[in-house]
Image: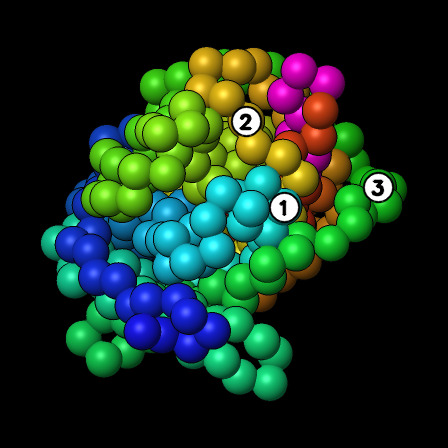
Amino acid sequence: MGAEGLRSWTVRAVNLPEHAGNSIHTDAGARAAGFPAALVAGVTTYAYLTHPPAAGWGLEWVASGGGEVRFRSPVFDGDEVVCAPAVDDDGQRIDAVVGGATRATLRAWQDGGPVPAPRDGEELPPRRIQLTGHWGADYGERAGDDLDLYARHGIVHPAVWPSLANNVVHTSLARGSWIHVRSRIAHHATAPAGAWADVRSVVVDRFHRSGERAVLDVRIEVDGQLVATLEHEAIIALP
């Protein structure tokens, strides 16, 4: 049993084919950027990190919890990832550990808190996306998350929310290969698989650190109900 009643969980990382549109998730593109092989998508690593809180805290966390995920170093296809819960001064933490090294960290909250106030910035074109296929209920299952919570309730996996934010980055901001760095995600409701999501995004900051970065505020509504808000950071142009 892990910290705060959460259990450690281990999975073999999978590089899902839909992420190949970002060449960093292909062997050729990753090697061109200085990596030895294709990087597993950050949202897939995030999907793994959500397993302990979703299993331990249940549907309530999926509907009204949240967390902040930070990616430290890449996970590669076939890596054995241990999602290890711990408690520190900042609360509940889940580390994605490969070979004894932490590759990503999720600081999880049982209560995602109030809806953040909208911030000014560069508005990007809104998107309307159906929650099927890449964004359906089985994202976690295809990535190796064996938790049946989502299939039982007919709802999408929480990794869909940063995946939709990544779609905005990929189609509106990125120039060539790009890297998802961090997301702060608050859940406000669950969403049924097959529904239509309206995604609205604003670029609130741009700066340079290991490449050109952008920070977005993303709001996702389903059938007029707010289901998730994100602060989403990515390197949109590698040095």
Residue that carries the numbered disc 1 in the rendered image: 64
| CA distance separating discs 2 and 3 | 22 Å
Mark 2 or mark 3, whichever is nearer to me: 2
Dot 2 crowding, Cα within 10 Å, few <14, some 14–19, many 20+: many
Q: Main secondary structure of the magenta part?
A: strand
Q: Write down the quadrant of residue 16 in the picture.
A: top left
Q: Answer with the quarter of the image where residue 117 lies.
A: top right
Q: Which residue is mark 2?
A: 191
| Residue drawn where x is 46% and y is 49% of the image | 58
Q: Position of residue 82 (x, y in %)?
A: 25, 67
Magenta region, residue range:
218-224
Left or right: 223, with 69 as reference point? right
Left or right of 118 on screen, residue 50: left
State the residue at coordinates (31%, 74%): 1
Whether residue 106 is visible: yes
Q: Give the camera-side residue of 71 and 82.
A: 82
Q: The disc labelled 3 sits on which kind of residue? A: Pro
On whether residue 220 falls in the magenta region, the answer is: yes
Q: Quadrant of residue 101?
A: bottom left
Q: Nearer the viewer, residue 80 or 215?
A: 80
Position of residue 120 measured from the top left corner of the image (x, y, whole percent): 86, 42
Q: Nearer the viewer, residue 22 or 114?
A: 114
Circle on res. 227 = none
**Residue tagged 3:** 118
Q: Residue furthest left?
A: 78
| Local crowd size for mark 3, using a 10 Å CA cut-off: few (<14), some (14–19), many (≥20) | few
Secondary structure of residue under mark 2: loop
- Name which of mark 3 and mark 1 comes first in the sequence: 1
Residue 190, percent from left and from top: 56, 32
Is residue 32 among the parts visible in the rendering? no
Q: Amino acid at mark 1?
A: Ser
